[in-house]
Image: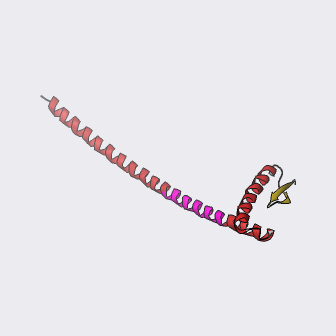
Amino acid sequence: MPLVEVVVNGRDYQVACDVGQEDRLRELAQMFDKRVQVLASSVGQVGDARLLLMAGLVLSDELSGAIARSAEREREIASLKAKLADGAETLEKAEAGVSELLEQAAVRIESIAARVAAP
C-alpha cells in the first residue's frame, strides 16, 4: 500500500492509499488544504486540531447539502418519468381513438362512394 505525502496547513502528512489512487489522494489533499487556508484566513490560526475540525465540518455541511439536492433531483426525475409514462399511456389511448375515428370515416366514405357509383 503506497504512502503519499500531502501538505495541509503547512504540515506534512503521510497517508496510505490503494495502488493507483496516489494522484487522486494528492488532488483531494490540495482541495482540503485550500479550504483550510480560506478558513484560517477568516478565523486565524486557532490550532491545527480545531482548524481541521472546522474545515471538516464545513465540508460535511456542503456534502449534506449536495446529498439533499441530489435526492431532490432524484425525486424530480422519478416524478417526470411517471408523468412521461402517464403521457405515453394517454397518447396510446388518443392514437387508438383517432384510429377508430379514421376507420369509421373510411366506412362512411366507402358507403357514400358506393351510393354515388350506383345507377
Which of the two residues, 17 or 46, is positioned nearer the viewer here? 46
From the top left corner, tell me how far across and down residue 90 is, in percent: 39, 52
Left or right relative to 62: residue 110: left
Seen in the picture, residue 68 relative to 97 is either above or below; the reply is below
Say whether residue 109 is left or right of residue 49.
left
- The colour scheme used here is secondary structure
Left or right: where 85 falls relative to 40: left
Please count the marks in the image: 0
- Write the residue at 19% across / 32% down: 113
From the viewer's side, name the closer residue of 97 and 119.
97
Which residue is drawn at the image coordinates 35% and 49% (left, top)? Answer: 94
Residue that extends furthest to the left in the rendered view of this protein: 119
Location of residue 8 in the rendering, given as x and y in whole percent from the top left corner: 80, 60
Which image quadrant: the C terminus? Answer: top left
Return the x and y of residue 5 as percentages of the image width and height.
85, 55
The foreground one among 115 and 100 is 100
Residues 62 and 80: in front is 62
Secondary structure mostly taken by the magenta-highlighted segment of the chain: helix
Residue drawn at (32%, 48%), measured in percent from left and top?
A: 97
Magenta residues, as a range? Answer: 61-79
Q: Is residue 40 above or below residue 119?
A: below
Residue ID at (85%, 54%): 4
Q: Say if the magenta span includes residue 76.
A: yes
Q: Is residue 43 left or right of residue 75?
A: right
Question: Relative to residue 31, is residue 109 depicted above or below?
Answer: above
Quadrant of the image occupied by residue 111: top left
Q: Position of residue 109 (x, y in %)?
A: 22, 36
Which quarter of the figure is the N terminus placed in? bottom right
